[in-house]
Each structure stands twice: as structure tokens, then as C-alpha cells.
Amino acid sequence: MNQKTEMAAIGLDETVLIYNALGIKTFIVKQANEADQIIFKLVNQKFKIIFISEEIYSHIPETLEKYQSYPFPMILPLPMEKESASVGLKKIQENVEKAIGINIF
Amino acid sequence: MSENNLNQNVGIISKVSGPLIVAKNMKDVQMYDVVRVSEKKLIGEVIELRGDMASIQVYEETAGIGPGEPVYLTNQPLSVELAPGLIEGIFDGIQRPLNIIYGMAGDRIPLGIDVPKLDRKKVWDFKPLAKVGKRVVGGDFLGEVEETSAVMHKVMVPPMVSGELVWLHSGSATITDVIAKIKTETGIIEVKMLQTWPVRRGRPYQKKLAPEAPMVTGQRVIDTLFPIAIGGIAAIPGPFGSGKTVVQHQLAKWADADIIVYVGCGERGNEMTDVLNEFPRLHDPKTGQSLMKRTVLIANTSNMPVAAREASIYTGITIAEYYRDMGYRVAIMADSTSRWAEALREMSGRLEEMPGEEGYPAYLSSRIAEFYERAGFVKCLGQDNRVGAISAIGAVSPPGGDTSEPVSQGTLRIVKVFWGLSAQLAYSRHFPAIDWLNSYSLYEDTLNEYFDENVKKDWSAQVKETKRILQEEAKLQEIVRLVGVDSLEFQDRLTLECARSIREDYLHQIAFHEVDTYTSLNKQYGMLKAILTWYHLSQKGLKDNLSFYKLTQMEVLDRIGRMKYLKEDHFDEECAKIMATLDQEFQELQRGDEFDV
């Protein structure tokens, strides 16, 4: 592994700063759509994994669509500010359904 | 003695099989001679000789004819009459004037009707062009006659005649009056305006030249993607209802030609009616005259005798050659050559010839070639080395739209432009339904140079890119069909959007829309430029993280889509405005998306 795996996390308030403890670069945005620009810049800097809060995740569908056909970055939703709305699980359900043709959940 | 004479010059029918008649006692006759069959004097042509038996194809109904009836020889080959009076005429397959027959006999053509092919009584104003005392050769202009307000008919020395011009008429004359006397080695020849020429023999020319300029048709998909040269040959194969006839009509209306010969061969009568109704009302963009003033119609509709269908193609091309010899650019449309081939098949079957593929005669492809080879860009006969051209455009109606049948294949071997119509496009109401993926033009390389020089420098580059995008689209569509459009990258989806725009806003053209029906090369360039500029800017925008959805929903796209309805006279300024709006909207998008991080 000579390639450094860069990770980042984006959230809407300070709770995201906890990721600093893991060596993950963190960003705070005021509005969800600002995250789009940050992700764009992170991608240009070859960041591989980007955690974003579920709140943001559900507000930037186009950005997610843009990167879903690429291997990197992996954009993962995490519950940060509020309770989990299980958006990640829904996404998995959708993908599984697309892959095998039935909803197994 | 007199009975003996009669026997020598009159054949006797021994067999009748539809339009084919076999007669004996025909040893004096020659191949392709015209004969008059029975006392009804039906017009027939000798198409096979065996001993003193002759097979005759009859150009009229043979009901009521039986063995033992006479066949009168004329000792002349099937010919057309060439003189002023052809333009604006509507003739049947053997050049009988249908409008005059209608005046004489009404809706149906009576059997054996004998009318002169061209009006003998009409007086024309002959203006001499040649000088008395000079040496003239075949093809030289003797004088000219204003045939219609759009066509100046040049009266030429007949092809095989040369000598000293000793007398030239000036002023009024009918087509059978002597208008010139030429002293040749064999004596003085009196020349009339009327020339006859056997239809099955091509009129001579000095030299065939390579086509170099495009025949602009005003049809975007044709001019941009698959251009035809002046003097070129093209085929339009397509299944039923895919719009062959409309494409042919559009070409007849708008093609950049001086004379149009439209051969309606075995197609429905109402299609000819459309031509007759529409052409007089439409105006040629160049001369401002009614389109009918430069058109000759040959009509042999599906209910007319089948043998005459075979002749109609030759009649048409001979008339076209005659005007080509005057130095005009002629376009001949044949709709449809399949019906003509079917006529050949019917005759061949009745002649009991060995059938070839699908029952067509073995000589089918050589006959097709013979017809198309008479087109071309040539240096005409005559001392002034003028050039003339015939561009031939033939429709082919392959059964089921499958071009692997003999007529399509025979045609494809010869033609250089192939506009394949697709049933699928027609079904989705995309007209003209010329399939951009399997059509081609072999004139492309030569014509691209012309376009780059005469329209805009980057014409061919632009066309190349358009084709690339359309091909790319077909590839991407396959992926989309498998896994859906959201699995594509935005760059690819942009290509799809651009291809859609090219298809819907550019290639799609409404023949019946007042403005859209004809698009000049300049407008074509401008329209394509706008679409491609949007594509390039958007590609760049995506790299700069502009929103794909915003890019595809730009307001200017709507205006680009409506560009085809912009009138030619103020297109340039409108186009400039659209390009400016395009730039402006992009700048706004870029500004709107900037954040400070």
C-alpha cells in the first residue's frame, strides 16, 4: 500500500469534528448543497472515502449520481446530527433489488 | 402480288399472353422496333426475335386481341420526341401526352389512340444563336426558344450531323418547321427543332467527368450527412410508409437543378396527383418561378399497362439527357425502380426465360446499371465544351424493407449514395426517416472539400463530429437498454442529450412546414454550430462541476430547438443572438455555482 488512503467527513455541525480523532479530514457546511463543491474538490485531490451526514446525503442526489459510476470516491452516509433515518439501508435495498431483480428485505 | 407484299410487311399473331404477343412472319423486323398490333393499332415493341417469330411487348391492354390478327411494322425503334414543349408536360411511359389524351378522351386512355407526342401546332419564337457560314458539329447551339419563363430551350444540331451552316431561320416556327440547313459531305440536311432519339440508346457526349460539386437539396440530413454530387446517383430504399415518395418529392421541389424529370413508375396515382397539385403552387427559391415550369412528369401509375412501365424509365432518362446536352443540370427521380423491375420480371416470365433470383430475370442488374450509368457529369457535345449533368435518384421498395433482395442489391452495386429509410424511425415519426447509421455517401470526401471552401472552413470537421456523436449514441443506447440511463457517467449522458438534440432539432425536418421544408447550407451550418457549441461548453462545464441537470435544462436549448423555424432572411442575426445567449447563460451558471470553501 504505497498509496495513501485519504478519507474525509462532511457534516452540518460540529459533531463531525469527532472524526478528526481518527485522522479523517473534516468539513462543516452551512447548507447541504455546499457539500457538492467540497466533494468536487476532494475528488480532485484523490480522496477515496467521503463520509457525509444523512441530512446532506438526502439533499445532493445529483452529486451522488455523478460519482456512482466511478470506483472512487465512496460516498457513505452516516447519522450525525439526528437519529438514523436509515438512508444507507434504503440505498442498499435499492442496489440489491437492481442487481438480483427482487426485494429480499 | 399485292397480297404477297402485304404478307411480307405484316406479321400474324400466333400467341397472346397478357402484354406479351408472339407473332410470326416477322423476319424483316429488328430488335426494339415499334410495331402496331391488330387493327386497333396498339403500340408494341419487339423484345425478342427467334427465326421469323418475334415477341412483342404491348404497351396497352391486350384484351380482345387474338391469334391471326395482323402486326404492322414501322421499322423504327421506340423513340422519344425531343423539342420545345416537353417542360410542364405530363406523359405516360411511351411519351404520350396525358393531358391532351384527357382532353380528347377523358379519364381512360382509349386503345390505340394516336396523338402526336409533342404539340405540332404550337408556334415558338426561335432566336438564332449560330452564324451562317460557320462550321457546326453535333451538339452546337443553333438557336434558342423560351420554353417556359424558367427554361431557355436550346435548339441543337443533332448529334451525328456536322457541316457548314448554310441557312438559319429566325422568328416564329413550329417544331416541325425547318429552322436550319446544314451542308454536309452527303448533301444538305434540313434541321427541325424536333429530334427523335431511340430511348434505349444513351445520347452521346464528349467525355464523362468526375462529379465535384454538391447538389444542394435543402434537406438537412442529406446535405449534411450524406450529400449527393451534381451528376451523382443515389438510391432510396425503404419499406412501405417510410417516406420514399415524400423524400423524392422534396428533392424534386428543392434540389439545386435546372430541370427535374419525375418518373412515377408503378406507384399510386394519387402520388402523381400530389405532384400535379403541389408543384404549380410552389416556387423555386432561385428563379422565383413555379416549380412546374422546370419539371417534366412521366406517369405510369400502378393501374397502367405493365410493359409501359419498363419504357417509362428509359423515356425519362432520354429526356433528361436531352436537357443535359443543352448544358443544364438535370435531376431525374424514379419512383420506384422496384416496380420497374417487377415489370421486367413479368415480361421475363411470359417470355419463358430462365428466372434468376426471386424470379427476376438474370439480366436485372445489368438493366439497372444501364439506367443509372446514363446519369453523370459530362462534357457535352459541341464546340463550346459546356458541361451538363444528370443526377439520378431512384427509390427502391424492397418487400418487407429487407434490402437483401435482388433489386436493392443490384442498385447498391452501382449507386454511390445510399439513403436507407428505416421503418423504425418512420414509426416513431422521425422524418425524413433516413437512417444515419446505415446510410452512406461515397461523394463525401470530394464534397467535403467543396463545403469547407464554399460554406465554412470547419464544415467537414463539424459533420465528422456529428456522425461520431450519433454513433456514440447507438453504442450508449445499448448499455442504457441493459442497465438503465442512471448507470452512465454524466459525460456520456451529455453525449446522449446532444445526440437527441441533433436528431430532434436538426435531422428531423418537416416537409410540409413552410420554412422547415428547405434549409440553406448557411442555416444548416449555423444550426449545427449552435448544438455543438452547447455540447462543447457543457462538456467543459461538467469538468468544472456544473450541474448536469442545469446544463440540460438551459433556456437557450429551447431556442436552439426552434432554430429550424427561423426564416432564412434574418437567420444570421437570430443565430448570433442565440450564440450570445448561450455564452451568457453559461457564464451565469458558472457564477451561480461558485462557493467559497
Image: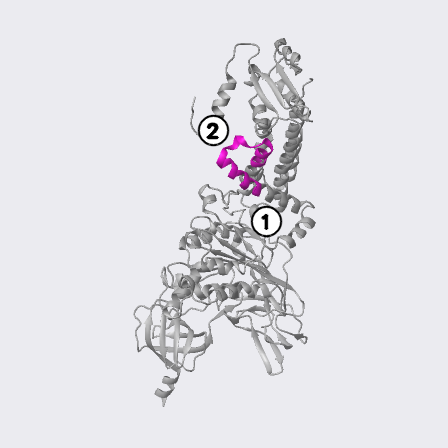
For this rendering, which residue is in front, B595 or B50? B595
Disc 2 marks which amino acid?
Lys
**Residue B223, numbered label:** 1
Is residue B25 placed above or below B408 in the rendered structure?
below
Using the rendered view, name the quadrant where residue A42 is placed. top right
Point out residue B324 in the picture as x, y percentages from the top left corner.
Answer: 58, 63
Q: What chain does mark 1 sit on?
A: B
For this rendering, which residue is in front, B149 or B428? B428
The secondary structure that dominates the magenta segment is: helix
Using the numbered discs, state the Cα–Cα distance from disc 2 to disc 1 in whole angstroms.
44 Å
The crowd level at tag 2 (other Cα within 10 Å; few <14, some 14-19, many 20+) is few
| Residue at image coords 50%, 22% | A91
Residue B484 is a magenta residue: yes
Is residue B317 placed above or below B177 in the rendered structure?
above
For this rendering, which residue is in front, B332 or B546? B546
Disc 1 marks which amino acid?
Asp
Q: Which residues are magenta?
A: B470-497
Q: What chain does mark 2 sit on?
A: A
Q: What is the quadrant of the C terminus of chain B in the image?
A: top right
The residue labelled by disc 2 is A98
**Residue B243, numbered label:** none
Point out residue A50 in the picture as x, y percentages from the top left corner.
Answer: 62, 20
Q: What is the quadrant of the N terminus of chain B in the image?
A: bottom left
